[in-house]
Image (spheres, grey):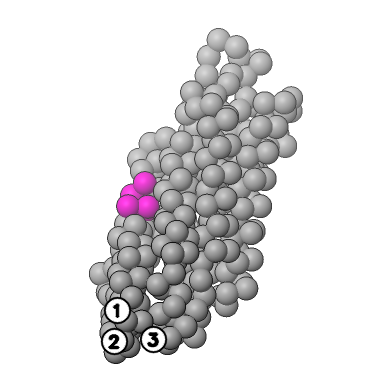
């Protein structure tokens, strides 16, 4: 059976995408203002929404998911390689509303019209937006599990076989982390980053792993003239 992972992708690109997604996700959840933790219609929520960090952190979060989708796509072939990009595309509209619509609502509220904060729930709970967001995150979760298992199948029994399993599992829990308190969400960002760095280190070590098949972008030492078969 042919490998389900493209063999022409450099390990450095895979590792770079993993680290980038981890740094962006950690930045998103560590820098995000949490004034809305007790609801979106409070003054503290308005101050959070109006902050420059609100925009910067949410852009980092959206970018983290886009980079993660690119990573999962690189590690997979066949129709499922599109699950990650499609998932990211479905998630981005909600992030756009969360980032910019709430920012403008807060600016109006702080300018003397606090009643406008009633629109926060309407923006966040819009049925179409919530549905697209949820389906997109499910697609990203499926893409991650498929990519991690594909990598594992190619590199078994090497030490790098489980490189992407922690990141795939943590990424699949992205939706539930929204229901955690601020400290829990920040901890999630740090764990995500740690899993991403672990994946990058494992990818780099795959080139030195003499027990398993060749890494992405290389050929098996036992089969120098053709792509690795799994």
- Magenta range: 85-89
Instruction: Specify whether residue 105 is in view.
Output: yes
Q: Do the residues labelled 1 and 2 touch (CB within 8 Å)?
A: yes
For the point 40% across and 41% down, the residue is 81
User: Vertical placement of 115 versus 157: above or below?
Assistant: below
Q: Main secondary structure of the magenta part?
A: helix
**Quarter of the image holding residue 92?**
bottom left
For the point 58% across and 44% down, the residue is 19
- SS at badge 2: loop
The mark tally for this picture is 3
Q: Where is residue 148 in the image (x, y as percent from the top left)?
A: 55, 44
Q: Nearer the viewer, residue 24 or 107?
A: 107
The residue at the far front in this view is 111
Q: Is residue 198 magenta?
A: no
Distance between mark 1 and mark 2 Cα atoms: 6 Å
For the point 67% across and 38% down, the residue is 202
State left or right for residue 212 relative to residue 217. Answer: right
Question: Dot 2 corresponds to which residue?
Answer: 113
For the point 61% across and 28% down, the residue is 215
Question: Dot 1 corresponds to which residue?
Answer: 108
User: Vertical placement of 166 versus 130: above or below?
Assistant: above
Q: Where is residue 206 in the image (x, y as percent from the top left)?
A: 67, 31
Crowding at dot 2, Cα within 10 Å, few <14 / some 14-19 / many 20+, comes out as few
Question: Dot 3 corresponds to which residue?
Answer: 41
Q: Which of marks 2 and 3 is in front?
A: 2
């Amino acid at each position: 059976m042919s490998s389900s992972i493209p063999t022409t992708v450099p390990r450095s690109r895979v590792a770079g995408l993993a680290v980038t997604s981890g740094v962006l996700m950690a930045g998103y959840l560590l820098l995000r203002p949490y004034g809305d933790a007790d609801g979106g219609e409070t003054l503290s929520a308005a101050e959070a929404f109006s902050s420059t960090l609100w925009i910067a952190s949410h852009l980092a979060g959206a970018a983290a998911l886009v980079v993660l989708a690119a990573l999962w796509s690189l590690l997979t072939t066949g129709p499922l390689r599109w699950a990650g990009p499609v998932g990211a595309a479905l998630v981005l509209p909600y992030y756009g509303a969360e980032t910019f619509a709430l920012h403008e609502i807060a600016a109006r509220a702080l300018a003397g019209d606090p009643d406008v904060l009633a629109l926060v729930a309407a923006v966040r709970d819009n049925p179409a937006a919530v549905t697209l967001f949820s389906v997109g995150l499910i697609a990203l979760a499926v893409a991650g599990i498929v990519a991690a298992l594909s990598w594992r199948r190619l590199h078994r029994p090497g030490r790098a076989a489980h490189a992407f399993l922690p990141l795939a599992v943590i990424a699949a829990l992205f939706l539930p982390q929204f229901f955690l308190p601020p400290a829990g969400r920040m901890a999630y960002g740090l764990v995500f980053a740690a899993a991403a760095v672990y994946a990058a280190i494992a990818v780099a070590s795959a080139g030195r792993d003499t027990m398993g098949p060749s890494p992405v972008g290389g050929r098996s030492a036992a089969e120098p003239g053709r792509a690795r078969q799994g």
